[in-house]
Image (cartoon, rainbow, N blue to C red):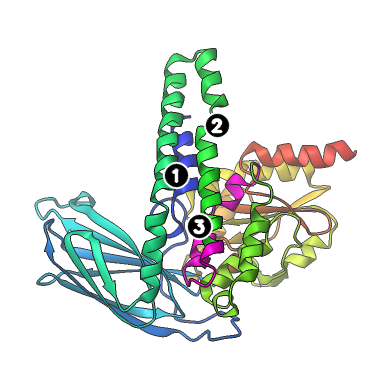
Amino acid sequence: MKNQIRTKYFIISIVLLISLVACNSKIYKNTTSTSTSAIDNTLKQFSIKGDVSKVKDPIDKIVIMYKSEGENFTDTTDVKNGSYKFSGKIRDARTAYLIAININKNIESKYKYTIVDRIMLFIEPTKMKATSSNSFSNLNLTGSPSNIDYQKWISASIPSKANMDEKAGVWFALGDTWMKSKSKEDSLRFKNYTGSRDANIKHVEFGLQYAREHINSPVIMQVLIDIPIKFVQGAMPRIAYQVDEIFNQTPLTLQNTELGEQLARQLAVRLGNQARNFSLPDMHGNTVNLSSTLGQGKYVLLEFWASWCAPCRAESPHLVKAFSTYKNDFTIFSVSRDRQKDEQKWLDAIGKDGTNLWPQVLDQNNKAANLYGVENIPANFLLDREGKIIAKDLRGPKLEEKLKELIDSKN
C-alpha cells in the first residue's frame, strides 16, 4: 500500500520527460519524419555546447533526453576539460532533460554511476550554449528564447508544487501510520484525507490559468500536456474541455508544432470520442484494421503493451480471464510497441502468456501509439459497441468489473 500511494502521487506530479523508470518506450534513434503538420515538418539541426568548468561537483558524463517525432532519444557524451557537446535533429522547440553523471572509477559495476544533478530545458533547432555555475542545474542557456519562457513557468509553479509536496507528505504519513497500526481510526483518517487531491486540483487550476494568460507563449503546449487530465477527471469533470478550449485559442503556428500535435491527439482520445482507426501487421504479417474488430459489434479493449514491459505482462492473466468470461460480447485488440529486432520476443511473449486469443499487431514505428497519445505502457482504452471511448487504463480486476457492469446488467 505504501508503495502504491507513493507511485500514484508521483504519477500525478511528475513532469512527462522526467520519467526515467517504468515502461517508457525504449530509447532509440529514428530520423524518419512522420508528422502531418501543415506548417513545417522538416527536421532541423540543433546543437548544445556546454561548460561545467565552474561546477564544484565532479562530472564525467552528460546525458540528454528528448523527444522528436514521437520517438524517445537519448545520447551520452564525455566531459572533457569542463566542456561537452550535443547535436541532433528536431522539428521545433520542445523540452529536453540534461543529467550530469559522476563515475566512481574504483567500482567495477553499474553502481559506479551517480547522478550529480539534472535540469529540464526548452531547446530549439539552432545553436545553443549552456553554462553552469556552482551547480550543474544553475544553468544559463543562450540561443533558445523559448527556454526563458519555460523557466518563468517553472518559477511561477514552485509555490503550487510545494503545496502538493507538503500535502502529499501528510498523505504518506497517514498511510504509513495506518499500515503500522492497522486500526480502523487510522484507516478512516487516511481514506478521508483530501488535502493531497485538493492540492493537485489547485495545481491543475493554476496551470490552466497560466496558460490562458500566456496564450501566445511557445511553451504553453507543454504546460497543457503536463496537466494530468486522467488523474483529476473525476474531481474536475470539465478539465479536458478546458484544455480543449485553451488549445483552440492558441495561434495556429503553435497548434502545428510537434507539441501542439501531441496535445491534439491526447484531446482527441478523451472519453466519449470515437476511436481512431489504424492498420498494422499481425503475427502472420497480415495487415489488420482496428475497424474490422470494431465491426463485430462487441466491446473492444484497445491495449498497448510490449514484451519487455513487466507491468504489461502482469496484466496478461487478467486480460485472458476477462476475454474468456465475456468473449461473446467482448474482445481485445493488442498493440505491441516492440521493435522489429525484438519481433521473436514479441511472438514468444504472446505464446507464453496465452494472449493469442485475439488480434495482436506490431506497432514498431509508433503509428498507433502516436495516434492515441500513448507515452507509457501499459495503457488501454475500452471502446463500446459503436467504437466510442468509454473508459481508460483499466488495470487488473477493474477491467472485469467494468465489463460486468456493462454486459451482465444488460442480460
- Does label 3 or label 2 sit earlier along the sequence? 2
Which residue position is annotated with label 3? 226
Please rate how many residues cluster around mark 3, counting C-alpha atoms within 10 Å: few if below 14, some from 14 to 19, many from 20: some
- Work out whether residue 216 or residue 1 is closer to the camera in this orientation and state it: 216
Element under disc 2: loop
CA gap between label 3 and label 2 equals 22 Å
* Residues drawn in magenta: 212-234
Report the side of 6 relative to 249 (left or right): left
Q: Do labels 1 and 3 touch, CB within 8 Å?
A: no
Residue 286's image quarter? bottom right
Q: Amino acid at mark 3?
A: Asp
CA gap between label 1 and label 3 equals 13 Å
Q: Residue furthest right?
A: 411
219 in the magenta segment: yes
> Residue 18 location in percent, x, y?
39, 56
> Residue 313 location in percent, x, y?
54, 48
> Residue 166 location in percent, x, y?
40, 36
Q: Amino acid at mark 2?
A: Thr
- Does label 2 or label 1 sit earlier along the sequence? 1
Which residue position is annotated with label 1? 10
Element under disc 1: helix
- Work out whether residue 160 or residue 42 is closer to the camera in this orientation and state it: 160
Above/below status of 335 relative to 2: below
Question: Is residue 371 at all visible to an observer of this figure?
Answer: no
Q: Residue furthest front?
A: 213
Residue 364's image quarter? bottom right
Q: Amino acid at mark 1?
A: Phe
Q: Which residue is rendered at x = 41% and y = 85% of the image?
A: 44
Above/below status of 390 relative to 6: below
362 in the magenta segment: no
